[in-house]
Image: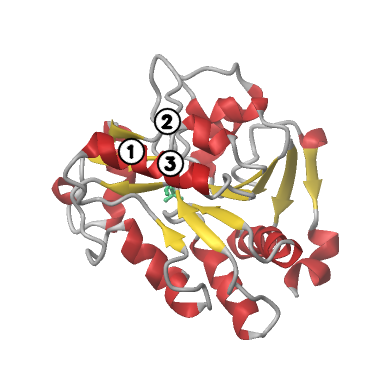
Amino acid sequence: MRIICGKDYSDVSNQTAQFLAAQVRLKPDCVLGLATGGSPVGTYAKLVELYRQGTLDFSKARTVNLDEYVGLAPDHPQSYAYYMRTHLFDHVNLAPGSTFLPDGLARDGEAECARYDALLQSLGGTDMQLLGLGNNGHIGFNEPGDAFCLPTHRVALTESTVSANARFFASREEVPRWAYTMGIGGILSARKIVMVVTGAAKAQAVRDVFFGPVTPKVPGSVLQLHKDVILIADREALSLIPDSVVVDLSALLPFANH
Ligand code: F6R
């Protein structure tokens, strides 16, 4: 695992985008695993900027998202399908039919989960998986529990996740209580994982995930078993971990910014 410390949200976003951009340049027909939420918004903005500058070409890439709320249609403004179109898909040259999310309106939840895992397998897994981190240590919507759940599954969101996500809805009551999420198996099958985290509210989760015991009570802790994980975070999010394991790339900013 490598930990990179960025100056602030914008710097963290730029550095995260540079890793994703490098993956697309290295393997134009790569499969990117994508996340939603507040953390990657700046990353997507930077990717759009790189595309507009003509330095990034998504025409052969495919994308697979981590999760979707159960019951929300793709055109619902709080659905993750809508989020992805708004922040990335509508602004870059991803080919039609090359972006995938669970179907929040699927009638048969079990069949939808099986379809999503088959899809992931047919794409050969992801080359690079982008992750955020929940305050409770969740990755995707793999919530704390008694066992790691490997396949894509339908999950009841915890009260802590509902509260955290209420900021995107008009009221807490509107936050869906269920979601489809790629399981721990799908996430760990990524060849590389890049996690973006900012803010003091995530400091304890970062410490638990990377320096605590590997336990389903802290789902992200399973990342300790993956051989290629990069955490890109600001100082606040890294405030509870030892300085000696953090790489500060601010000296390389001119590189990181172009
Ligand atoms: C979203 C996802 C979640 C978020 C996490 C952090 O697709 O998979 O695990 O990454 O809830 O959300 P933010 O970034 O809003 O704090």
Identify the coloring: secondary structure
Residue under numbered circle 1:
113
Amino acid carrying label 1: it is Cys
Alpha-carbon neighbours of circle 3 within 10 Å: few (<14), some, or many (≥20)? some
Amino acid carrying label 2: it is Pro
Residue under numbered circle 2:
151
Q: In the picture provided, is 182 more to the left or to the right than 56?
A: left
Point out the residue furthest to the right here: 251
Does the beta carbon of the residue at mark 1 sit less than 8 Å from ligand 1?
no
> Residue at the spot x=63%, y=50% of the render?
128
Res. 122 visible in picture:
yes
The nearer-to-camera label among 3 and 1 is: 3
Q: CA distance from mark 3 to mark 1?
A: 9 Å
Amino acid carrying label 3: it is Ala
Tell me whether circle 1 and circle 2 mark residues in contact (CB < 8 Å).
yes
Tell me whether circle 2 and circle 3 mark residues in contact (CB < 8 Å).
no
Q: In the rendered image, which quarter contains the N terminus?
A: top right
Q: Secondary structure at mark 1?
A: helix
Q: In the picture provided, is 68 more to the left or to the right than 42?
A: left
Q: Secondary structure at mark 3?
A: helix
> Residue at the spot x=51%, y=42% of the render?
121
Q: CA distance from mark 1 to mark 2?
A: 8 Å
Does the beta carbon of the residue at mark 3 sit less than 8 Å from ligand 1?
no
